[in-house]
Image (cartoon, rainbow, N blue to C red):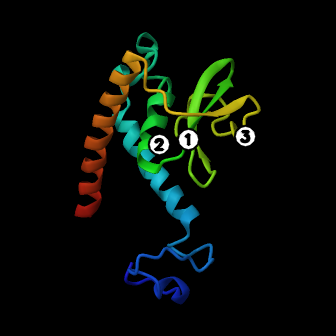
Amino acid sequence: MKNHMHPNCYQNHGMGKSNWCGDENCPMNPKKALEKAMVFFRQVFEKAWCRDTCWHKMEWDESKPKSAGQCYVTALIIQDEWGGKLVHGKVNHLDHYWNQLPDGTEIDLTSDQFSGGDGLHPHPDRKVIGLAKSVNRTIKRYKLLKQRFEDERLRQAKRIKLK
C-alpha cells in the first residue's frame, strides 16, 4: 500500500501496527477490507460448491442457488480463515449456520439460498455454538470443499495477479 495517502495510517504502515485513520474511504478501513474479502470469498465458493459438498446431494439442482445446502461447511471454512464462532438458527424451519467473527461481525455467505437473502441477521432463534465437525459425512464434505476452495482461490489469485 505504498500509495496510501492517509498520514495517520501511513506513518504506521509496515511497522506491525494496524492503525486506521478513521476515514471511511481509507483503503485501510477494516470494514471495507472485510467486505472486499467476503466478495472475493463468495466468488471462490461459487466455483467450489458442488453436489458432493451439498448437505442434500439428492436435492442438488443447478436451478437453485449454488449455496443451497452449503452453509455448515462454508461456515467452517470461514471460521478456519477468520476465526470467531459458528452461529446456528432456524430459517423457514430449517437449520442454518453462519459466522460471528472475533469482533462480533456476523457474515453469512450462503444466505441467498433463502428468499429475502441477507435479511437473516439478527435472527431471534439463534445461538452461538462451538466447532462440531463430528459427523463423518460432514467431515468428508468439509475436506472436499476446503480443497476445492483452496484450489479455486489460488486460480483466481493468479488470474488477478496477471491482470
Crowding near the residue tagged with mark 1, few <14, some 14–19, many ≥20 C-alpha atoms within 10 Å: many
Cα separation between marks 2 and 1: 7 Å
Q: Quadrant of the N terminus?
A: bottom left
What residue is disc 2 on?
79
Badge 3 element: loop
Marks 2 & 1, CB-CB < 8 Å contact: yes
What residue is disc 1 on?
85
Badge 1 element: strand
Q: Which mark is residue 122?
A: 3
Q: Which mark is residue 19?
A: none
Q: Which callout, 3 or 1, points at the residue further toward the start of the chain? A: 1
Q: Residue at x 42, y 51 (%)?
A: 40
Q: Which callout, 2 or 1, points at the residue further toward the start of the chain? A: 2
Cα separation between marks 3 and 2: 19 Å
Crowding near the residue tagged with mark 3, few <14, some 14–19, many ≥20 C-alpha atoms within 10 Å: few
26 above or below 159? below
Amino acid carrying label 3: it is Pro
Residue 53 position, x and y percent, is 37, 24
Q: Residue at x 48, y 87 (%)?
A: 5
